[in-house]
Each structure stands twice: as C-alpha cells, then as structure tokens.
C-alpha cells in the first residue's frame, strides 16, 4: 500500500503501457531533479489524460505505441485541442496540462539515447495551441460562514476530547477478551489499547453480528445508518479505534482553528512537528514551512489578553472584525492538538514533521498510523456536511485564509505592507485584495472620501441665490422668506443693491474684500459670491455676461479659463438653464433695443494667459 499522499503512475492500468512508462520515467526524473512538490500532480494528471485518450482512440493497437512513433503526432494534436471540453470556459487546466506533457517530451528528446519522433519533438518545442485561460480567484468566506466554521470546529474538538477520554476510561475497566468476552465493548477496547489483540483478532474471534448483544450493535452502528451484516465487523473495529485515536475526520477541525488563529496556509499549519513548537509565557512560537515557496519561518503568536470586567469600548471596526469565542489563541489549539494526537504519534514515530497524525483500520483489518491526508475520502467538504455548516460557493479551505487576511487588512486600516506580512505585496494585491469584503470596504472608503471632499467643496464654493422666475410676483414677503431682512429686501426691490449681473445683500461684507470696504470685484465675481441675489430683471445682464465669458473661452487655454472663470461659467449656465425660452427671447429683445447694458471694468477686457 502506498503511503498517504504519495503520487504514482501505474502503467498497467493503460493499454498503451510502453508510452505510459516512457512518460512516467521522465516525470520521475524531473521531480527528482527539481524537487517540486504540489506541482508534481499536474504531470500525473497530464499523463493520465493523454494515455486515456490514446487508449480510447487506438484501442488494442495502443499496446505497441511509443514516443518514437511518427503516427502519434495526430493524436497529440487532437488530445491538446480536446482538453477544453473537460473543463469550464477560460479554465487554466487545459493549457497547463498541455505544457506539462510538452515538457516531458522535450526532456526525453534532450537525451540522445532516448528516441523521440521528430514531428513529436517539433510539437513539444512549438507554440501552444491553447490560450492560457484565466484563473478565477476564490472569494473569502462571509463573516457569518467563518464564525460558523470556527464555532463548529471548537465544538468538534470538545466532542473529540470527550469521546477519547470516555474510550480510554472504558478501556481501563476491561480485561483481555479471552478472559472477559469478545462481545464486551470494554474488553475489546482494553485489548486494542494495550496491544493485546489486533483488529484482525477481533474479526476472527467475534461471533456473527446477529449474535451480538444490543449494546454492541448500537455501538457499531453509525448515526443515521443501519448495521450491515456483511461489513459489521469492520464497522465495529473502526468504531473501537475511533474511541482510542483521532481519525481523519477529526483533524479537519484543528486545521480550521489553526488557520483562523495564525492566518497561515493549510500547508503550513499542518506541516510542523513537535520539535517545531515552542511555548512562550504568553503564546507559542511555531516553525512554519511553505514548500511551494521554499520558505522556512519562525513565527510567534501571542495570546489575547483576557477581557477586563465591565463594558469594553468598541473600536471603529468592531462590526467588521470577527471575535469568536473561545478566544482565538494559537497556543490553545496547539496544546489541544498535541494532547489529542499524543498516542497516535507514539504509534507513528517515523512521522516527525507534522502533528496531524491519524489512525485508521484498512479493509484488511490492519491498524495504520500515519500522516493525515486532507484530500482523502473524508475531505473538507464531507466535514462541512457532517457538521452541518452551510457554505455558499467553492468548498475550499483556502477561502478561510483569505477571510483571515481580510480581517488583518481591516485591522491594519488597509496598509498592504502589514496585511502582506507573510508574502509579497504583489501576491496580496493579486490573490487577496480582490475579495468581496475588501472591494465593498474599499468602495465605501472611496465613496466616503468623495462625499467628504464634495461636501467641503460645496461648503467652500460660493454661489448666488436665484429668485424665482418672472412669472412669480416678487415682493417683500417672498424675499424675507428666503432669508433676507426687511431692509435688505426693500433695497433689492428698489434697485439700490444692483451690482450689474446680480444684486448684493451686503456689498460691504464681500468675501473678496476687507470687511467694511466696498466690494471691488463686482460684477465679475458676483456669480461666485454667496451675497449675490439673482433677480428675474438681471436676465439681460446675465446674457451679456455669457457673451463676455464665451469670448474669453476663445482667447484663453482651457486650463487657464477653468482656473479663472470655471466656477462663474458653471453657475451662470445653471441659472440660465432654469429660464424659459420665452424669458430669454424677451431679454434678448431688451438687449437689441439698447435697454440693457453690462458695465465691466476696463481690466475685464484684457486677459493674460499665465
């Protein structure tokens, strides 16, 4: 039996045995030369895909085919072009698999003593026939999903500890089954715990399931399932082992908790052994290995301070940062993991590079103690279903790391250098900054900033107050309702405060002159002044002022015009757009008849483009 997690290529399962052996030899040499780990699986997939394709197309004739055959060229082309049919649109897998097979053929062609047909070598060294595709980044878990994951993982850990404690306590009450009974749960546990019997002994000595006592039948039956006579012995032995040692299903909870507490990848939190753990007075230091990047890091994780009595002040991000209970402490999780796997690790002294060690009973009733395989028959998705955790989208443990990275980005107030403390800033921007939560928060931040500056701009931009159009009777009451005093309203109606293009409620308190001095910039800046009041009677002068600004637009460059007259131009257009065509036509008649004149200072006719 192959060790858990070991990759292999078995030529005997294909008709094209010779071709499979040639590709497998190149793959083995390449892995040994490059020491690649996770990416080695891609080459296995490529070999399997291609050899299955050859078997399907050639049938019995596939037995004699090899890389030295010229007739293999059309099959290679057809295989590469058929790859996208098995994957989603824009998937990266087709191009990656094709590139992997090309590399193996190129390596074989590089050896003079290994025959490769010339057309196959040209294909392998030639341009790719498939586009690279587009990788879809996984989104992080939502806040409620992550809370449910962590809460359920802690509940699972407590249930595991309770189950194992009860199992070993019951084993201490038993005796050897030959002395006691082969149908006694306590005696069976005692014999297995003390290595007095083996799982195969249980298979050989225990009577048929129909003769079992009710408590033994209930013990061997899984929740929600019936006891199947044909597999009753195997179910019983596995239930007995589950009372003594943690199994594959149990360790998913510890991986969830360690990823949540540390923020590191699944590969790293399951890749340190007992010698890589150092407990500190207020935390734990772990040695983490990331095989894909070849990084070995020593990281200290401090315990969270105990909450003080009384109400605690809430931070600005209190509604965004997940605060699960029990407190998320890496040291507490590591201690639980060390304690629960202690007996299993003692049975597997050859495993020193991980604390994730599980026990199992094979179909041949052999006890196995070895490394945990998270991609086994009981994977993360099965754990979610069994624990009743509802997850939307892809059920991939990598989404949990993204959730933790999002929290770190929020806590550090968006500083990428702090959030990307265990990888490059480029990696954070590509793989983590595209998550839904950060996009929403970024959008809120941008919108808040824009609103802030917009509000400030509105507060600083001074503009006139426009009195309703000429169809409305303008009287003292109307002007007083808009905020003018009785004296100011009377002066405006009498025309005493007419400054040219508008009236001014107080020309001695203008924003462009010293208090107490008569405004020196009227009427050029009246349309930017908060003291200005535009009356219906000012429409002819506004049209004349529009002509003046249009002339300046033809003289000045756009940046200069926008800087000098941009606000006046915008406000003027807004005022004129509120007037009806009939009002504008009547005002133009007044201008043509010489009844409206715009008096501008002499300097208004000279502009310098500077």
Image (cartoon, grey):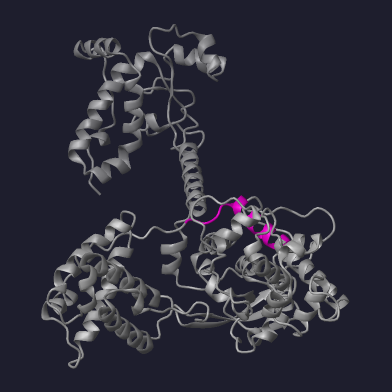
Q: Is residue 198 above or below residue 236?
A: below
Left-right relation of 106 to 311: left
The question of residue 116 being in magenta is answered with no
Q: Position of residue 347 (x, y in %)?
A: 68, 85
Magenta residues (range): 139-155
Q: Quadrant of residue 418?
A: bottom right
Q: Quadrant of residue 354?
A: bottom right
Residue nearer the viewer, 22 or 437: 22
Q: Is residue 151 above or below residue 506?
A: below
Secondary structure mostly seen in magenta is helix
Q: Residue lying farthest right?
A: 173
Left-right relation of 101 to 286: left
Q: Position of residue 516 (x, y in %)?
A: 51, 33
Q: Residue at x 62, y 80 (%)?
A: 368
Q: Residue at x 82, y 71 (%)?
A: 184
Q: Position of residue 156 (x, y in %)?
A: 70, 62
Q: Residue at x 20, y 79 (%)?
A: 64
Q: How many marks?
A: 0
Residue nearer the viewer, 579 or 587: 579
Q: Is residue 252 above or below residue 510?
A: below
Q: Residue lying farthest bottom?
A: 113
Q: Position of residue 389 (x, y in %)?
A: 62, 53
Residue nearer the viewer, 275 or 27: 27
Left-right relation of 77 to 337: left
Q: Residue at x 60, y 57 (%)?
A: 384
Left-right relation of 1 to 64: right
The question of residue 149 being in magenta is answered with yes
């Amino acid at each position: 039996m192959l060790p858990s997690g070991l990759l292999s290529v078995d030529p005997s399962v294909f008709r094209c045995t010779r071709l499979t052996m040639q590709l497998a030899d190149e793959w083995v040499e390449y892995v040994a030369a490059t020491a690649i780990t996770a990416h080695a699986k891609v080459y296995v997939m490529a070999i399997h895909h291609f050899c299955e394709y050859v078997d399907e197309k050639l049938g019995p004739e596939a037995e004699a085919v090899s890389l030295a055959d010229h007739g293999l060229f059309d099959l290679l082309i057809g295989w590469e072009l058929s790859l996208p049919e098995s994957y989603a649109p824009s998937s990266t897998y087709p191009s990656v698999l094709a590139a992997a097979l090309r590399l193996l053929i190129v390596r074989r062609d590089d050896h003079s003593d290994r025959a490769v047909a010339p057309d196959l070598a040209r294909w392998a060294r030639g341009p790719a026939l498939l586009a690279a595709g587009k990788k879809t980044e996984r989104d992080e878990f939502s806040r409620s999903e992550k809370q449910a994951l962590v809460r359920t993982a802690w509940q699972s850990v407590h249930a595991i500890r309770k189950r194992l404690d009860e199992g070993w306590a019951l084993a201490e009450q038993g005796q050897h089954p030959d002395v006691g009974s082969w149908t006694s749960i306590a005696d069976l546990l005692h014999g297995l715990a003390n290595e007095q019997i083996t799982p195969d002994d249980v298979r050989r000595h225990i009577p048929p399931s129909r003769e079992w006592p009710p408590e033994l039948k209930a013990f061997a039956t899984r929740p929600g399932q019936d006891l199947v006579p044909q597999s009753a012995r195997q179910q019983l032995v596995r239930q007995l082992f589950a009372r003594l040692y943690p199994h594959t299903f149990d360790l998913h909870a510890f991986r969830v908790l360690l990823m949540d507490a540390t923020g590191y990848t699944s590969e790293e939190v399951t890749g340190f052994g007992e010698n890589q753990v150092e407990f500190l007075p207020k935390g734990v230091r772990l040695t983490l290995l990331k095989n894909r990047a070849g990084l070995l890091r020593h990281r200290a994780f401090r315990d969270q301070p105990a909450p003080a009595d009384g109400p605690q002040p809430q931070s600005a991000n209190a509604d965004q940062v997940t605060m699960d209970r029990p407190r998320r402490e890496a040291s507490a999780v590591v201690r639980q993991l060390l304690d629960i796997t202690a007996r299993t690790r003692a049975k597997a002294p050859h495993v020193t590079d991980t604390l994730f060690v599980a026990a199992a009973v094979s179909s041949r009733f052999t006890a196995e103690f070895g490394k945990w395989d998270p991609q086994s028959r009981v994977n993360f998705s099965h754990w979610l279903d069994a624990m009743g955790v509802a997850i939307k989208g892809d059920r991939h443990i990598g989404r949990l790391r993204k959730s933790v990275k999002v929290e770190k980005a929020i806590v550090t107030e968006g500083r990428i250098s702090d959030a990307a403390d265990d990888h490059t800033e480029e990696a954070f921007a590509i793989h983590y900054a595209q998550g839904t939560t950060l996009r929403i928060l970024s959008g809120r931040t941008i919108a808040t900033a824009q609103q802030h500056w917009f509000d400030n701009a509105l507060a600083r931009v001074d503009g006139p107050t426009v009195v309703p159009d000429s169809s409305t009777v303008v009287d003292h009451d109307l002007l007083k309702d808009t905020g003018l005093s009785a004296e100011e309203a009377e002066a405006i109606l009498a025309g005493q405060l007419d400054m040219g293009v508008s009236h001014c409620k107080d020309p001695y308190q203008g924003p462009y002159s010293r208090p107490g001095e008569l405004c020196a910039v009227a009427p050029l800046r009246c349309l930017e002044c908060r003291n200005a009041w535009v009356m219906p009677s000012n429409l002819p002068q506004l049209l004349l002022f529009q002509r003046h600004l249009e002339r300046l637009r033809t003289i000045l460059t756009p940046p200069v015009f926008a800087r000098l007259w941009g606000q006046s131009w915008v406000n003027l257009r807004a005022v004129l757009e509120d007037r009806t065509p009939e009002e504008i036509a009547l005002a133009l008649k007044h201008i043509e008849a010489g009844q409206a004149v715009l008096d501008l200072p002499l300097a208004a006719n000279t502009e310098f483009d500077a």
